[in-house]
Amino acid sequence: MFGCPHIFPHEPHSLKRAKSGTPSIDFKDAKALRELTYAILWADFQLRLQIPLATLCPPIPNRLDYILWLEDLIGSSGPVRGIDIGTGASCIYPLLGARKNTLWEFVATDVDPRSVNYAQENVSRNDLGDRIKVLQSTGVLLLPDELFSEDTFDFCMCNPPFYESEEQVAAAKEAKALDSFAVCSGTKSEMITEGGEYQFILRLIDESMGRKDHIRWFTSLLGRKEDAEKLSETLASRKIRFVLDELRQAKTVRWVIAWTFEETKGNRKHNGPPLERETIKRAAIEDKGNGGSTVANLRHCPHLLTLRITVVVELKQSSVRAIQEGRDEPFEYEVRREKWTPQQFLLAYPSGAYTVARTINGSSVVSLSRHVARMYDTLCGISFNRHREKLDEEGASVSEVKLAKKEHTPVREALGSFRDQSVCEKICEKMLRKAIAEFYHVSEDARMEEVSLAASGREAMAMVFVTYSHKTQEVNVVSYCAGLPPRRSAPLHVCVYGPRRGNPEVKDSIWVRMRRPIEAVKPADVAEMLLTDKDGNIYEGLRTNFCVVVKEPDGRYVVISASKDSILMGTMLSLVEAACKRKGIEFRFEFPKSSDRHRWVGAFLLSVNNVVTPIESIRFGLIGLVAFFIEPLMCSALPDHRSHPILLPQDCPLVRELSKAVWGEMEREAAPIFNDPADNHQPPRPTILERGAYSFIMPILSRSQSELLDRPAITLTFAQSLDGFIAGPNKTPLLISSPESMVMTHALRCMHDAILVGISTVLADDPSLSCRNVQFGPDGVSPVRHPRPIILDSRLRCPIPAKFMGRNSIIVTTKGHDEEERKKLEGAGAEVLVVEEDAVVEGRIRLEKILGILKGEPWNVGSIMIEGGASVIGYCLGERDMPVDNLIVTVAPMVVGEGVRSVEEGRVMPKLVEVGWKQFGRDAVMSAKVQK
């Protein structure tokens, strides 16, 4: 090729002499590299290109290898249509593919307008405009709706940027990963993307779930083997058929991955193992080393993933038809294990109505009746054909789409029975219960098989989903259950972004699809994006409800959330409203306004997972319609949110109070899961959390040997923050224990005859002192046995009524008490124990003096669990004569900073032996034997 001016026109400036004296290419010279590319393209493919020096100069052998690999994958001699995502200024893949295959057509996209212009010129320069169409992409979606009005494609391809940041590029250069042999130039959009190639292809996988009927094969090139392995695991976990191959050119190795949703895959030349969705076994990605691009080298790389286990329960069509025909028959289910996220579950079916519930204490559903009612309202209010989905996820024809634009008879007929309130309630309740019950049983089986579960030992979330398919004209009823991740209690950063959702009063899966482009531009350090309008009214988050706290001039706190008819009234928002009513706190449904943000003294988000989560900062800037319709290429302006943040108090007392109150409302509205043995096909049994708690506690208590003591065995327990606080400033109560460690605490109560607290705890918290968070005793069969409450109350200040009353409680007091108060307490069902003067020092009851009395008749208390405040903890641990057998401390991963410490500074503490630790949810629980 050298010495041919028409091929290599700038030869004198592009060649150098090797040590041997022969001409050689200076691969570190960008101009020389570009001229070599021009020469290869003209000599082998009769293609003429113009490539700007600042952009990537494509290595032709590597690019050609991808095209050859696609030819083998598609295996078709007829017309083929493909999409090139991020085609670049060269438009190299469409040009090579179209030149080599006369029946291939391409749609090429790019976000850079300069690259689009060059790509269009290169297509025109080679007279391929009738087979290659170049489009400007917004960047919000990799596969935008504009591509799929009526068209289908055989494949899509992309070669995503490798790097996550400019620093990573610089580090690679320093390590000589880039410039050891050849120069590497490229624009920022060609070299860098948020999260690197892994996140880019992960986005493509997510989007492919909604394009499964429009693209046969989704493919991408990869530059890192570890990314190929992780993406293979992701595809395997979602049970998506995929193939992975290695493309090798000299010392350069790239990987190419492809996945499809078709039931039978059509490459007749495929010599590898079949792509089987059902076969999920552990395997490694093989290094084949032969460098070929033939399909004989394709390998299915299945991985058994231990990321999460979820359960999907689908109502059989025979049961659906029975409902539609008004026949009262037992439900028949199909239960299967999946590894879907909630979003993947909702995207796996046609659009429909759904609701999301959660468990509490591993045994009850929160606000089941509210969820049932909302499901009914949604089914009545939803229109399954009015949305901008164009039925693309169902592969409907244009005529079917036009028919679906009307409120046509099949929809009304199919959903008629489901819009009956009694039928809806029955379906919703049974499907939620079934999914949750199956999840706990499957989780237990998986644990026994030693499968690592991300959700093991935690609470669960469940969904019931009613969908309608315009293609099959059938209703699907499915439910889903997965473990909830650990609850986040640390303050969040949020930003104000774009307009409100459409049709907010119903919970339909269309919103899941519509919010994805908005989530795609969410800054990495932002937990949630709030929706607003041009007037600065803030509605809700993409996935949460939003509330602010305002302090009125008269000192009153007011909680404000957007008006009910403008948002999706989430279950947690309803619970906050109920908690405010119970606490006497004013709650208003009116818009929080951006212009009033100087009045906010606190703000929080509400979600099924985290319940109440305080907000640390809110960023303002590009808001309302301006932000929503901003040109996607200007999305780099979104960090403008960072320039206008408002910082909110992280310790708003009302937010703390509401957080605790909402958990109380959740417990009040909890409905047992395992109350329908006929439906669950097996009797109720203890949850994983209960069994784990008892297995942790029983060895600890057995060492006390209480039967040999002349006093009750004593267990002291309390919960504290990481920095040692049990209450906030001014003794403000803190919600420290996670739901998981609370189950452990209640199981511990169940294994003691009595539970003892001081009167200060009763006056501050009005505790129930029960075992409401567990269902069974330690044997897993007998019902839970609540401990007998013992209250140290030297002056008989115990209020009537109190939550613990009615369980034969013991009030320990001193002589000289008010006889009228004693009569009131005894009338309420309590027994009053009056101690002698030698058991009282400075008005305080010396507990060690009464332990022998409690062990004997008529009290017969063999073991006592002490849940104390700071004074009781200090007394039990610091007083030499006060026996303590076991100490159990829950430590939560939170920092309080100031308040009431569990142990006063300077106090001498006893020695702890036989120390052990176990994790419950996010909390660490310490057990120890106390030596004095």
Image (cartoon, helix red, strand yellow):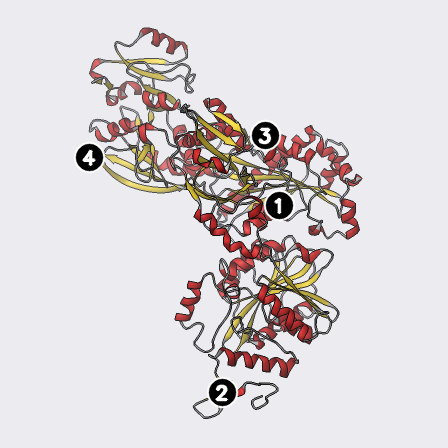
How packed mark 1 is, by other alpha carbons closer than 10 Å (few <14, some 14-19, many 20 or more), is many
Query: Does 611 sit left or right of 928 as displayed?
Result: right
Residue 545 image position (x, y, % from top left): 53, 37
Indicate which disc, 2 or 3, sits on the residue closer to the N terminus.
2
Quarter placement of the N terminus: bottom right
Report how far apart the C-alphas of labels 4 and 2 lie in the structure: 79 Å
Which label was assigned to residue 346? Answer: 1
Task: Check the image and report above or below for 309 versus 547.
Answer: below
Which label was assigned to residue 841? Answer: none
Q: How many marks?
A: 4
Quarter placement of the C terminus: top left
Indicate which disc, 3 or 4, sits on the residue closer to the N terminus.
3
Indicate which disc, 1 or 4, sits on the residue closer to the N terminus.
1
Secondary structure under the numbered disc 4 in the rendered image: loop
What amino acid is found at the position of numbered circle 4 in the picture? Gly
Q: 144 or 554, which is in the foreground? A: 554
Query: Does 904 sit left or right of 95 as displayed?
Result: left
What amino acid is found at the position of numbered circle 1 in the picture? Leu
Indicate which disc, 4 or 2, sits on the residue closer to the N terminus.
2
Report how far apart the C-alphas of labels 1 and 4 lie in the structure: 57 Å
Report how far apart the C-alphas of labels 1 and 3 lie in the structure: 21 Å
What amino acid is found at the position of numbered circle 2 in the picture? Ser
Give the quarter of the image for residue 242: bottom right
Report how far apart the C-alphas of labels 2 and 3 lie in the structure: 76 Å
Residue 222 image position (x, y, % from top left): 54, 66
- The residue labelled by disc 3 is 370
Residue 183 image position (x, y, % from top left): 47, 76
Indicate which disc, 1 or 2, sits on the residue closer to the N terminus.
2
- The residue labelled by disc 4 is 906
Secondary structure under the numbered disc 2 in the rendered image: strand
